[in-house]
Structures are given as structure tokens and as C-alpha cells.
Image (cartoon, rainbow, N blue to C red):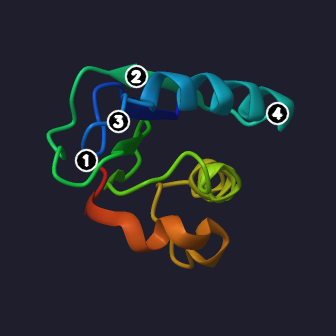
């Protein structure tokens, strides 16, 4: 399995339209422009509805991460920083998340590789 970021396509703050699909398209372009080896996909739900927008990081033989509370309006550059950290971590274990900016504060869980 290739590294991937999975963005919830139904997450939305109160009375706003979901923004996951639009953000996924923006990130796909940024990932391609940055030559990052990561797929950007969406899913119907990550069960983090109380704190949208949620996303996960996943990779073969890598730790899996779950985030919520992302804001596509301000977090795109931080997401690119986070994705670089994830791609560069052989086992997905990110020791220093400073380059992930505000998103490091949105981490909800990390599952070790298996």
C-alpha cells in the first residue's frame, strides 16, 4: 500500500457545506507539485463528526494517525509539512511534529505499525 492521506468528505461545521472533497483536490495538486509519494483520497466518514474536518494518514508497515479539527482555509501548508514528515519516516513514527504546525495539535490518535 502506498502512503495516503484519507480526508472525510462529509465533515462540516455547523450549517456549512462539507469541504473535504475540495481540500483533497487542492492537496492532490500540492502533493504532485511537491513530488511527494502519497495518495490523497476521500472517504464517506471517519467518525469524528463533532470536530470536523477529520483526516487520517496510513501507509504500508507504518503507524496510522487520526486527526480532527483541520481547517482547509489555514492548514494546507501545515498539511504539506505533515505529509513530508510522514513520507520520510520509515515506520511512520513522527518524533518531532514541529513542521506540521497547527495540525500537530489536531492529533486524536496514533496506532503503531503491525
Secondary structure beneath label 1: loop
The residue lying at 28 percent from left, 58 percent from top is 112
Who comes first in sequence, dot 4 or dot 2? 4
* Image location of residue 20, percent across then percent down: 44, 30
* Image location of residue 111, percent across then percent down: 24, 57
Residue 109 to residue 55: above or below: below
Residue 10 to residue 61: above or below: above
The residue lying at 75 percent from left, 25 percent from top is 29
Circle 2 or circle 3, nearest the eye: 3
Mark 1, other Cα within 10 Å: few <14 / some 14–19 / many ≥20 = few
Viewer can see residue 67: yes
Who comes first in sequence, dot 3 or dot 4? 3
Instruction: Confirm or deny contact between disc 4 and disc 2 (CB under 8 A).
Output: no
For this view, does 83 lie left or right of residue 6?
Answer: right
Mark 4, other Cα within 10 Å: few <14 / some 14–19 / many ≥20 = few
Instruction: Confirm or deny contact between disc 2 and disc 1 (CB under 8 A).
Output: no
Inter-mark Cα distance, 1 to 3: 38 Å
Inter-mark Cα distance, 2 to 1: 23 Å
**Label 3, on which residue?**
16
Circle 3 or circle 4, nearest the eye: 3
**Label 4, on which residue?**
35
Inter-mark Cα distance, 1 to 4: 27 Å
Circle 2 or circle 1, nearest the eye: 2
Find residue 114 and name its label.
1
Circle 4 or circle 2, nearest the eye: 2
Mark 2, other Cα within 10 Å: few <14 / some 14–19 / many ≥20 = some
Secondary structure beneath label 3: loop
The residue lying at 56 percent from left, 53 percent from top is 86
* Image location of residue 80, percent across then percent down: 68, 50
Q: Quadrant of residue 54?
A: top left
Amino acid at each position: 500500500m502506498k502512503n495516503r492521506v484519507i480526508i472525510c468528505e462529509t465533515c462540516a461545521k455547523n450549517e456549512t457545506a462539507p469541504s473535504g472533497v475540495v481540500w483533497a483536490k487542492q492537496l492532490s495538486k500540492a502533493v504532485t507539485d511537491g513530488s511527494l509519494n502519497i495518495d490523497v483520497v476521500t472517504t464517506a466518514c471517519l467518525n469524528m463528526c463533532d470536530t470536523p474536518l477529520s483526516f487520517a494518514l496510513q501507509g504500508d508497515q507504518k503507524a496510522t494517525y487520526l486527526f480532527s479539527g483541520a481547517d482547509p482555509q489555514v492548514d494546507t501548508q501545515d498539511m504539506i509539512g505533515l505529509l513530508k514528515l510522514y513520507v520520510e519516516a520509515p515506520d511512520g513514527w513522527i518524533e518531532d511534529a514541529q513542521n506540521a504546525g497547527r495540525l500537530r495539535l489536531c492529533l486524536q490518535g496514533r496506532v503503531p505499525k503491525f
